[in-house]
Image (cartoon, grey):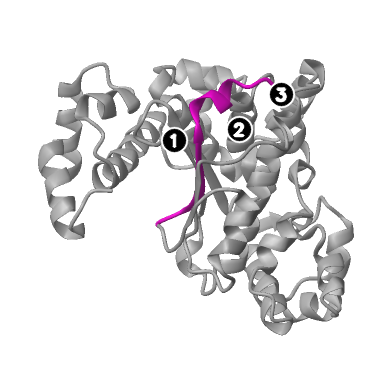
């Protein structure tokens, strides 16, 4: 299931292709997608097939910003029950937590993250396809993913939401001004991720019209699916939960198990069945984030240790020596020497 995505990801595709003077069905068949799959939002298609059909349509109709245009047709509804959890969250931060936790139900091929941007007043929203290295042309899927994310933010916050800046992993075929008009902010291309920056106050904004009872029912439904058809996503769920909880220090086995309505021993057994342990996941998340922050930010080490959930900087330093064979200062200096600068 790791390379699948809900067919709702193609919401608006036939209408968009039709507006360009074409027909969606031949493109879908050429990409290996059954045309009737689009009519069933609970059906799944190949993530690579989605990438292929978007690229085919963009080339066939000379529409380099096709993915961005398609995102204007999409929003929370494409996420199914995951979107219900977000729509009825108490705050934007809770909504994003719910999406990140259960995103594997929409597609196990995608990971999102909300991370500090190196300043207490700013955060990064990032999108990371897990199969990125196996994809050839990522422009359209990247623009669709990021554009749809903007639509979701505007549904949760209001149409007035505008990012501080946006980043594209690729160099787009359309003029940069096209993307700056869409996002309403400066856009940097050929970055190391798709995403945008926003002020930290956004996370505390209430979601208007939310209904806690509806959210609870959706949570119970999705939590009951852990171990089901997409149950292989449990380690990824735990990983995402730990990543979000590190700065709050509420990432113990008991804390995380409680968020899944599981006994800690039950969670440990289920993770063992997937060949991993809770502590291995925590350590791996810290390792990944430490490597990224040391390479790409000038964040003070004391602050970085805090972001990674360490109570003392010395504990962070010991972990760095185990991971990298050197101190965090030395690892940052080595990364700076390789790249020429720390961003």
Residue 244: percent from the left, percent from the top? 47, 29
Q: Is 79 positioned to the left or the right of 276 in the image? A: right
**Residue 229 falls in which quadrant of the image?**
top right
Packing grade of label 3 (10 A; few <14, some 14-19, many >=20) is: many
- Residue tagged 3: 207
Q: Distance between the residues labelled 3 and 2?
A: 11 Å
Viewer-closest of 72 and 241: 72
- Position of 327 relative to 43 (above/below): above
- Position of 56 relative to 197 (above/below): below
Q: Is residue 248 located in the magenta-colored stretch of the structure? A: no
Q: Is residue 197 located in the magenta-colored stretch of the structure? A: yes
Q: Distance between the residues labelled 1 and 3?
A: 20 Å
Residue 64: percent from the left, percent from the top? 64, 74
Q: What element carries label 2?
A: helix
Residue 140: percent from the left, percent from the top? 62, 67
Residue 176: percent from the left, percent from the top? 54, 64
The answer to whether any part of residue 45 appears in the image is: no
Of circles 3 and 2, which is in front?
3
Callout 2 touching callout 1 (CB < 8 Å) = no
Mark 3 or mark 1, which is nearer the start of the sequence?
A: 1
Q: What element carries label 1?
A: strand
- Residue tagged 2: 96
Q: Is mark 3 on a helix, strand or loop?
A: loop
- Position of 219 relative to 140 (above/below): above
| Residue 115's disc number | 1
Q: Is 166 positioned to the left or the right of 118 in the image? A: right
- Tally of numbered tags: 3
Residues rendered magenta in the picture: 192-207
């Amino acid at each position: 299931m790791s390379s699948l995505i809900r067919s709702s990801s193609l919401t608006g595709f036939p209408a968009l292709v039709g507006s360009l003077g074409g027909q969606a069905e031949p493109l879908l068949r050429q990409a290996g997608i059954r045309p009737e799959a689009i009519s069933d939002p609970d059906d799944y298609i190949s993530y690579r097939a989605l990438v292929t059909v978007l690229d085919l349509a963009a080339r066939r109709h000379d529409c380099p910003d096709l993915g961005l245009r398609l995102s204007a047709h999409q929003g929370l509804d494409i996420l199914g029950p995951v979107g219900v959890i977000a729509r009825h969250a108490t705050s934007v931060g809770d909504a994003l937590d719910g999406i990140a936790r259960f995103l594997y139900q929409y597609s196990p091929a995608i990971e999102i993250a909300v991370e500090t941007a190196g300043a207490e007043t700013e955060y990064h929203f990032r999108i990371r396809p897990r199969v990125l290295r196996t994809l050839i042309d990522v422009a359209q899927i990247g623009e669709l993913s990021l554009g749809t994310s903007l639509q979701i933010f505007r549904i949760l916050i209001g149409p007035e939401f505008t990012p501080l800046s946006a980043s594209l992993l690729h160099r787009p075929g359309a003029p940069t001004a096209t993307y700056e008009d869409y996002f309403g902010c400066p856009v940097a291309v050929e970055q190391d991720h798709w995403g945008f920056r926003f002020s930290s106050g956004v996370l505390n904004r209430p979601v208007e019209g939310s209904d806690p009872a509806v959210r609870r029912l959706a949570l119970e439904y999705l939590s009951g699916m852990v171990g089901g058809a997409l149950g292989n996503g449990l380690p990824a769920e735990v990983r995402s939960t730990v990543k979000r909880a590190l700065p709050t220090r509420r990432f113990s086995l008991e804390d995380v198990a409680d968020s899944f309505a599981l006994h800690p021993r039950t969670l440990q057994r289920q993770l063992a069945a997937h060949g991993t342990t809770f502590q291995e996941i925590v350590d791996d998340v810290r390792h990944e984030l430490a490597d990224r922050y040391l390479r790409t930010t000038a964040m003070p080490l004391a602050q970085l240790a805090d972001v990674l959930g360490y109570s003392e900087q010395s504990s962070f330093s010991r972990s760095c020596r185990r991971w990298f064979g050197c101190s965090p200062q030395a690892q940052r200096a080595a990364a700076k020497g390789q790249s020429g600068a720390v961003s």
